[in-house]
Image (cartoon, helix red, strand yellow):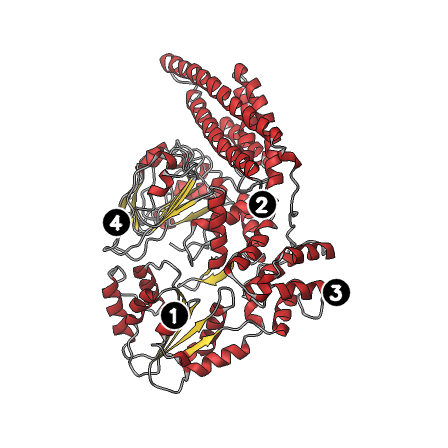
């Protein structure tokens, strides 16, 4: 117990050492914290190493101050950017080295009561480890010295920052409705309803077309809410640029209430089932964010022309797609228009001041100038208004600075490039502690329904959440999440089961992915051909999102672990997972997540190799896989979340000192582990049956008042 307490105390020190987390500094602070730990009492026997560690810590601290300063600069000189990237990658490598060392020392010092032979064996191992770490520290020291010399030579510290950080107003509550929908949509809504000509029995498709950010989805949703009661069945389905057609059609099937034969995954079979269900019904379908005619040619096959007055609305940015969806009848197309000056003003003022009549007189002029530069684009207005609303104190100089940073041409000719610059301004004004959390959203596919607690636990596993005052890490993470929602960077939505979920606007996701590429934060792959890209990267890949289709006829990602991905920290797999890499090669992995693969026949997934992943903090295998877990996992001392509904309980699970969230055995009809009472870190439990739980376990559960059911889970 004392060793466990010491371990927790050291982790608290590590957390307190990290004050700012951002894309470039995100690994530096934990590294400095671990170097501080190496200088602590537990490692006092490393006399020859501690002096070098102290020197290394000082060098890195000096560089970290420069990194934090560079985070506020939108554009960097080539030499400066190269230095920043080099230091970031160096810090990753250093942390991996320190992790290896701490793991080896931990194993060598374990079980002091062992026999003489074992103790001598461990002592020899410790000596070898010390010798190796001394050599590695010397190499790391040389790299740090060289990087610091470059910092001085390039005069990195003389760079001027282009903008300051923004404080979030803690009084702003989480926004649960789209403010774009509050003003200026009555007229467009009436026009779209008029185009639908609801009294006609003939099947009809109406298209809404317009530039990204004009509010097409919001308009379609308002029409949907107003009219859904007039139809036998209805559904709202987002398509996205790269639709997974079996998944999309299965999602439509569920929203229409078709529950039988849920494991059908052939497109033709799903379409046949949809047509049969809709054949004699009056239906209303919104097909949102359609990008190409090929996708429409498949989707439209699911909608029978039954003469019952059924209606379909398609939203798209592409005029040719809008025309095709309407069978080339241009009279069935509604072209989005920017809101009027009056509606734009209402939208802006309501978001910033709470009412259009509460704008202070000294802010009237600068507000009008900012509105002009937004070009009447609702997404731009909301983005800038959310930025201004997040300021703790209003300063006219700040507002004028933001006004001047907006390109004047955007008001005349709104373009994707112009919108990107506005969204980038939003990113540059994020506090540093939110930036890495924001970039992690790039791990999710377009239009993905994100679960808040799931995302927060991944942030924690990656070390993005900082605990400075003893606050529960999940509470801190949720406050970070709410800040992103308050700033309109994440949008509340409803999933197909009627639960609250969250999405990222596709234009915002484009910005995130560009930032991720720029900072080597994460990579996204869709095909096996894409898998060759990480091997050709200048830097090693630290986070990888694999997005594969579930269609049996399509290619399924299958890969080995190239050197460039051997140091992954997060691997998130979306879709059918028929072949996984040798997990034992991913020795630095923190997050290993196999996300919802679609409605397919359950298969087995062997993850027994996780017993060798000593840095693993988060494991998720959804209910569409029978997970084969190792029989023993006590070596995973950092594991925080174990989310494996269809898995058997490892025999030594009670020996995981940091396990906070446990979902296991959901359909195995099993009770709680007998020794759950000694799991002091456990906070959430899911999937166990109390009536199958031994009395000893129930008594142990009673001693853990911090444990609560996980009420936001959807398996």
Compared across the picture, whether 310 is left or right of 602 comes to right
Q: Earlier in the sequence, mark 2 or mark 3?
A: 2
Q: Position of residue 414 (x, y in %)?
A: 54, 64
| Residue 360's disc number | 3
- The quadrant in which the C terminus is found is bottom left
Camera-side residue of 574 and 23: 23
Crowdedness of circle 2 by 10 Å Cα count: few (<14), some, many (20+)? few
Pair 3/1: label in front: 1
Camera-side residue of 277 and 29: 29
**Marks 2 and 4: in contact by CB < 8 Å?**
no
State the CA–CA distance, disc 2 to disc 3: 34 Å
State the CA–CA distance, disc 4 to disc 1: 41 Å
Q: Residue drawn at (35%, 83%), measured in percent from left and top?
A: 309
Q: Position of residue 695 (x, y in %)?
A: 39, 43
Q: Position of residue 102 (x, y in %)?
A: 47, 25
**Marks 1 and 2: in contact by CB < 8 Å?**
no
Pair 2/3: label in front: 2
Mark 4, residue position: 603
Q: Earlier in the sequence, mark 4 or mark 2?
A: 2
Tell me: residue 166, above or below residue 491.
Answer: above
Q: Earlier in the sequence, mark 3 or mark 1?
A: 1
Mark 2, residue position: 75
Question: Which structural element holds mark 1?
Answer: helix
Crowdedness of circle 4 by 10 Å Cα count: few (<14), some, many (20+)? few
Mark 1, residue position: 320
Question: Which structural element holds mark 4?
Answer: strand
């Amino acid at each position: 117990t004392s060793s466990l307490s010491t371990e927790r105390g050291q982790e608290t020190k590590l957390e307190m050492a990290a004050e700012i987390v951002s894309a470039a500094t995100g690994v530096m602070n934990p590294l400095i914290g671990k170097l501080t730990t190496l200088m602590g009492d537990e490692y006092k026997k490393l006399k020859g190493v501690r002096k070098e560690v102290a020197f290394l810590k000082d060098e890195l601290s000096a560089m970290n101050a420069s990194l934090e300063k560079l985070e506020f600069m939108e554009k960097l000189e080539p030499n400066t950017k190269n230095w920043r990237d080099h230091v970031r990658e160096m810090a990753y490598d250093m942390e991996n080295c320190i992790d290896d060392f701490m793991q080896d020392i931990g194993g060598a010092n374990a079980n002091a009561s062992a026999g003489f032979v074992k103790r001598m064996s461990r002592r020899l191992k410790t000596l070898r480890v010390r010798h190796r770490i001394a050599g590695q520290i010397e190499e790391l020291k040389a790299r740090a010295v060289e990087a610091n010399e470059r910092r001085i030579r390039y005069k990195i510290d003389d760079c001027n920052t282009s903008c300051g950080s923004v404080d979030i107003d803690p009084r702003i509550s989480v926004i649960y409705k789209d403010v774009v929908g509050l003003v200026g949509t009555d007229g467009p809504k009436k026009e779209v309803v008029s185009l639908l000509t609801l009294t006609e029995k003939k099947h009809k498709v109406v298209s809404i077309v317009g530039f990204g950010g004009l509010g097409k989805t919001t308009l379609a949703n308002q029409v949907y809410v107003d009219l859904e009661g007039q139809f036998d069945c209805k559904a709202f389905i987002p398509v996205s640029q790269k639709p997974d057609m079996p998944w999309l059609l299965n999602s439509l099937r569920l929203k229409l209430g078709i529950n039988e034969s849920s494991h059908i995954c052939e497109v033709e079979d799903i379409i046949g089932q949809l047509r049969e269900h809709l054949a004699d019904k009056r239906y209303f379908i919104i097909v949102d964010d359609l990008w190409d005619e090929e996708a429409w040619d498949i989707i439209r096959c699911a909608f029978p022309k039954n003469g019952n007055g059924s209606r379909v609305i398609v939203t798209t940015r592409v005029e040719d797609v809008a025309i095709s969806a309407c069978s080339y009848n241009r009279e069935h197309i509604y072209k989005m228009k920017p809101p009027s000056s009056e509606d734009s003003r209402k939208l802006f003022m309501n978001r910033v001041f709470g009412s259009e009549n509460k704008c202070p007189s000294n802010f009237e002029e600068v507000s009008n100038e900012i509105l002009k530069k937004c070009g009447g684009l609702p997404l731009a207005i909301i983005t800038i208004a959310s930025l201004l609303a997040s300021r703790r104190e209003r300063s006219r100089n700040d507002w004028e600075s933001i006004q001047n940073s907006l390109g004047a041409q955007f008001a005349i000719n709104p373009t994707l490039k112009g919108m990107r610059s506005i969204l980038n301004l939003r990113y540059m004004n994020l506090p540093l502690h939110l930036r890495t959390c924001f970039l992690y959203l790039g791990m999710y596919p377009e239009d993905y329904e994100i679960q808040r607690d799931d995302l927060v636990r991944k942030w924690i596993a990656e070390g993005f959440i900082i605990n400075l005052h003893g606050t529960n890490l999940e509470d801190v993470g949720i406050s970070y999440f709410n800040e992103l929602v308050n700033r309109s960077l994440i949008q509340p939505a409803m999933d197909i089961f009627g639960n609250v979920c969250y999405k990222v606007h596709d234009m915002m996701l484009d910005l995130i992915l560009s930032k991720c590429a720029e900072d080597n934060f994460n990579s996204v792959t869709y095909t096996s051909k894409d898998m060759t890209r990480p091997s050709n990267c200048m830097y090693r890949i630290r986070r990888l999102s694999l997005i594969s289709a579930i269609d049996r006829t399509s290619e399924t990602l299958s890969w080995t672990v190239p050197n460039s991905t051997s140091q992954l920290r997060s691997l998130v797999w979306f879709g059918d997972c028929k072949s996984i890499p040798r997990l034992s090669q991913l020795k630095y992995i923190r997050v290993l997540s196999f996300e919802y693969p679609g409605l397919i026949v359950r298969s087995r997934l062997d993850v027994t190799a996780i017993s060798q992943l000593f840095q693993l903090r988060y494991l998720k295998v959804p209910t569409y896989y029978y997970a084969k877990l190792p029989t023993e996992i006590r070596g995973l001392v950092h594991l925080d979340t174990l989310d494996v509904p269809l898995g058997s309980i490892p025999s030594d699970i009670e020996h995981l000192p940091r396990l906070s969230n446990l979902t296991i055995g959901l359909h195995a009809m099993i009770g709680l582990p007998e020794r759950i009472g000694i799991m002091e870190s456990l906070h959430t439990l899911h999937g166990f049956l109390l009536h199958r739980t031994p009395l000893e376990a129930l008594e142990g559960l009673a001693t853990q008042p911090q444990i609560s059911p996980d009420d936001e889970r959807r398996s």
